[in-house]
Image (cartoon, coloured by chain):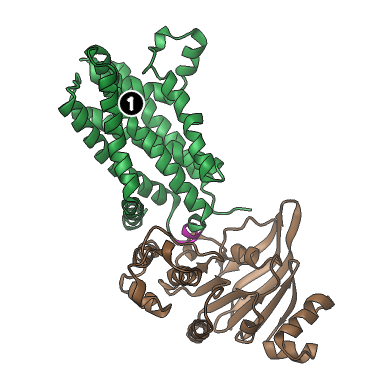
């Protein structure tokens, strides 16, 4: 594995993103506006805002990185740069790590900005350090990236790639426990919810926000999130084929 | 000159039909070999097999003694795709700097190749805003960065003006004189005259393998265009 090739790839992905000022602005401003909206929506119902606000901070990066990665990787596939790169010494692992480093960097900035608004301006509180929430946000961003990478193999156009968001991510958000607690769902929904990775990502955030002890369930959540990320990255790597028909 | 690209019994199938039929050929260094044929004849498929990105049904492709696409070859074989494979949202220099780092080429090569493809006055321009011919030159430049021993170019001069085309062909010959193996595909017959050796491909088969003057002599045609048409339409192997 070459550090230089990995770093070059991360720098290249970041340069591409930096060039797109509007996307950067949207990535940073939209989560802040949404958290403000939620704050106003639950004005006077401080407890509700506290219970959904913190997990929301940690889930924004997942959605953003899912979209950005699926489109970026789809472009690599359709413009021929992926095929070209795979004829160079760059390995798939280096390519994926380069992407991971670049998007984790963006996620850190995004989580920091939205945390500043949430914790600083809107008075959100977490049982544990804000840094823990940000770390979870970054882990979720990388999970979103891994999902995006994987689904990009199944999209032929950018239209299709964008549609994978409501198809793939939205059901997970609905069922993760953010809107209705898992134990209050119908049995069959609970069953579905318990096999969706986002349920565990949400639970980890929820515990970091409200559970003073964290406990083994928190670490199990983290393990599931990291495990799913690695699995999705592995599946994504399989779709990066050097030889194609 | 020993063969640097050796193809034995290569067959490629796509969508239920055979694109390349039992191809056997060898290409050596020190000369510019032209791969010519009408569109759809299998030129790009053959080139993709040589750089190891094509799934092959049968046969063997070896480059510099190793199986095509082997990790050891990836810094020794240069590949220029038919449509420019560079990042439109990066500048000319950013594209080349990235490819230089990926290929392990020294950073000083970036300016050298930009100069070589005649883009020295637009290094800061976004590639997406360049003309088709300029994009093709950026793509070509990426393959020159690490001075590969084998350079495989899929229609590298499409959309280029005649002056630039002449300069690039002169450059290809300079590279060949230094011992580089060059395989250049084209569907433009006036480029065939600039090759040392021609491989004529039709429907996935090599129908002729000879120098340009030999092609003229054998077909009795006035120019290469006519000679090519004679061969392609006549159907008899030269």
Residue B157 appears in view: yes
Does the segment drawn in magenta span residue A73? Answer: no
Q: Residue at x 44, y 53 (%)?
A: A91
**Chain letter for the green colouring in the rendering:** A
Quadrant of residue A55 in the image?
Answer: top left
> Position of A178 compared to B189: left or right?
left
Q: Nearer the viewer, residue A184 or A191?
A: A184
Q: Does residue A21 lie above or below A219 as drawn?
A: below
Percent across and percent down for residue A237 are 48, 44
Percent across and percent down for residue B19 are 72, 61
Q: Residue at x 40, y 25 (%)?
A: A198
What colour is chain B? brown
> Position of B205 compared to A122: left or right?
right
- Tell me the magenta residue range: A84-88
Quadrant showing the N terminus of chain B: bottom right
> Position of A102 compared to A186: left or right?
left
Q: Nearer the viewer, residue B57 or B145?
A: B145
Q: Which type of secondary structure does the marked residue at label 1 adopt?
A: helix
Dominant secondary structure, magenta = helix
Percent across and percent down for residue B155 are 58, 72
């Amino acid at each position: 594995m070459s550090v230089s090739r990995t770093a070059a790839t991360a720098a290249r992905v970041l340069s591409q993103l930096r060039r797109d000022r509007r996307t950067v602005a949207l990535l940073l401003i939209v989560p802040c506006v949404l958290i403000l909206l939620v704050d106003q929506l639950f004005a006077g119902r401080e407890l509700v805002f506290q219970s959904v606000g913190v997990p929301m901070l940690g889930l924004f990066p997942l959605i953003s990185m899912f979209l950005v990665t699926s489109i970026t990787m789809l472009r690599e596939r359709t413009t021929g740069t992926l095929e070209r790169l795979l004829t160079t010494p760059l390995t798939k692992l280096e390519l994926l790590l380069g992407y991971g480093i670049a998007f984790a960097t963006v996620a850190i900035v995004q989580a920091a900005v939205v945390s500043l608004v949430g914790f600083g301006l809107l008075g959100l509180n977490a049982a544990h350090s804000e840094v823990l929430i940000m770390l979870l946000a970054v882990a979720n961003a990388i999970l979103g990236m891994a999902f995006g990478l994987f689904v990009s193999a199944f999209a032929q156009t950018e239209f299709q790639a964008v549609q994978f968001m409501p198809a793939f991510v939205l059901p997970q958000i609905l069922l993760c426990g953010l809107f209705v607690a898992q134990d209050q769902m119908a049995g069959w929904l609970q069953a579905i919810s318990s096999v969706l990775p986002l349920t565990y990502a949400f639970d980890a955030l929820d515990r970091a926000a409200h559970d003073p002890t964290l406990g083994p369930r928190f670490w199990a959540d983290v393990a599931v999130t990291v495990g799913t990320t690695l699995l999705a990255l592995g599946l994504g790597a399989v779709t990066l084929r050097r030889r194609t028909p | 000159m020993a063969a640097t690209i050796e193809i034995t019994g290569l067959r490629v199938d796509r969508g239920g039909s055979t694109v390349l039929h039992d191809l056997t050929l060898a290409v050596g260094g020190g000369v510019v070999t032209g791969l010519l044929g009408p569109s759809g004849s299998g030129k790009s498929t053959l080139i993709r097999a040589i750089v190891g990105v094509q799934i092959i049904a049968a046969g063997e492709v070896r480059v510099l003694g190793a199986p095509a696409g082997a990790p050891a070859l990836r810094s020794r074989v240069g590949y220029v795709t038919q449509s420019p494979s560079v990042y439109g949202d990066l500048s000319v220099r950013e594209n080349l700097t990235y490819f230089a780092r990926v290929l392990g080429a020294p950073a000083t090569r970036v300016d050298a190749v930009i100069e070589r493809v005649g883009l020295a006055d637009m290094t800061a321009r976004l590639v997406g805003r360049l003309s088709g011919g300029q994009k093709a030159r950026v793509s070509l430049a990426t393959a020159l960065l690490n001075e590969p021993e084998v350079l495989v170019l899929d229609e590298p001069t499409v959309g280029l003006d005649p002056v630039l085309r002449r300069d690039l062909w002169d450059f290809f010959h300079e590279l060949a004189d230094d011992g580089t193996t060059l395989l250049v595909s084209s569907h433009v017959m006036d480029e065939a005259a600039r090759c040392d050796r021609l491989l004529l491909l039709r429907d996935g088969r090599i129908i002729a393998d000879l120098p340009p003057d030999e092609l003229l002599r054998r077909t009795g045609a006035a120019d290469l265009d006519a000679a090519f048409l004679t061969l392609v339409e006549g159907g008899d192997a030269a």
